[in-house]
Amino acid sequence: MRELVAGLTTFGAVSYVIVVNPAIVSPAGPDVHSLIVVTALVSMLGTLIMALLADLPVALAPGMGMNAVFAQTMVIRMGVPYSTALVVIFISGVLFLILAVTRWRARIMQGFPEPVLIGMQGGLGLFIAYLGLANGGLVVNSAQGPQFGSLHDPVVLLVTAGALITPVLLAARIPAALLLSIAATAAAGLFIHHAGGKPMTALPTQYFDLPRIPHELFFNLDFGDYFRNIGKLLPITFYFLISGFFYTGSTLITVLRRANMVGGNGRIIYERRAYSTDALASAVGALLGSCQVGAYVESAAGVEAGGRTGLTAMVVAALFAVSLVAWPLIGAIPTEATAPALLITGILMLDIVATIDTSKPEGMVPPLLMMLVAVVTSDLMMSLCLGCFVYTLIVVARRQWQALTPMVIGLDAILGVYLVLMNATS
């Protein structure tokens, strides 16, 4: 019974991804309804693999932040076809799997500069928060630059109210606060109309139906195009590999520490299995048309409710399976309804800022520069390039040769080639 309650709690905390992920990825081309089915299916399979292979109470789903890089940066900004972008995710997942089963996992963790990792997560958090503001109409572009949306628009007023109430729900520890925020905003949208008279939320003709099989996304990977453009795509492949690798590690430690399942050396139980599960889920997800899959820190809610084994994850997987038949109702939720949840998710990712070492220039300048570039330009790859380069230049200027690890030098070289190729082909 305890594991059942924990599974219900975890699903309530992570189920918002079924709505939010399609809202982020659909601008890249795929149909929203197809993405809803893929999101639920991949989340079900990934969480089930975690339950069976690693026996841990952790839910897996398309990663928040990584979905924005996938859709907004790689497909829209860089112009990479969706089928080629899936190859990037697949290859990064395979490389992740190789690292997960070897000792290279620990070497990479030790050799990568922490300030750049902080900048990556902080930049993603700001970018996700900005997407929430933009999707909800709270930020609009004008001749004078970005401005707050018009409060004469009822939709903007509703989203603003949602943005104010959602953090209150979280602070009050309301179960499934983000999901409740989305549902309440969407329900209110039935009575709110856009300037043209169209209702913000329109109910579907039927609420439940058999899953719509997204044939256009399944196994639609263009390996030929990837290898023809490998010079441009290899750096962003490493971006997904690095970010997924470290995000998984930090998430698992955060969640399992609450369950006293982390040793004194900081290592989690079944570490190799847990990393391998995450990597395998990303590779399988790419084959099914999904962006990168990752462990969700919201799984901590289920751990707090008593979840300690894979049974919790099995309950979550079963609930994701049930959601597959509710895709018509889920698809009726408008983008504006997801905006408050997206905004708060991005803000919560900024907790990493507290770990910035302001006593050293190499600890402070790279992450803050990366976050600034990410939110102003929406170019997450450029923010990574500048963060790595300025970190290297500062440690050289301070003659801290021990900080110039092979990982740092290799990443600088790869990113340098990336900039040259992008400049030559843009």
Image (cartoon, rainbow, N blue to C red):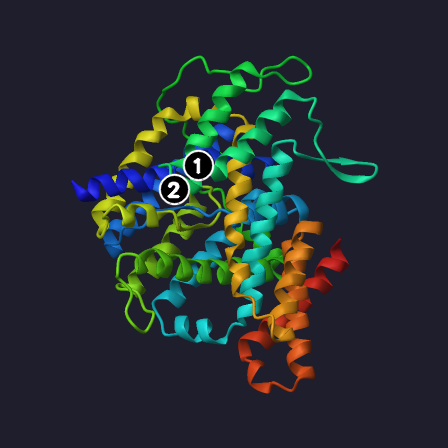
Number of marks in the image?
2
Image point (20%, 44%), residue name = 3
Mark on residue 42?
Answer: 2
Answer left or right for 23 relative to 319: right
Query: Farthest residue in the right direction?
Result: 143
| Mark 2 or mark 1, earlier in chain | 2
In percent of width and height, residue 419 lies at 70, 63
Could you tell me how far apart the alpha carbons at marks 2 and 1 are, in whole angstroms? 28 Å
In percent of width and height, residue 360 lies at 62, 76
In percent of width and height, residue 319 lies at 29, 35
* Circle 2 crowding by C-alpha within 10 Å: few under 14, some 14–19, many from 20: many
Q: Nearer the viewer, residue 247 or 186?
A: 186
* Circle 1 crowding by C-alpha within 10 Å: few under 14, some 14–19, many from 20: some
* Residue 324 visible in rendering: yes
* Residue 237 visible in rendering: no
Q: Which amino acid type corresponds to the residue marked 1 in the rendered image?
A: Leu
Image point (42%, 62%), residue name = 96
Mark on residue 264?
Answer: none
Q: Which amino acid type corresponds to the residue marked 2 in the rendered image?
A: Val
Give SS at disc 1.
helix
Q: Nearer the viewer, residue 71 or 190?
A: 190
Disc 1 designates what residue?
Answer: 169
Give SS at disc 2.
helix
Answer left or right for 16 relative to 230: left
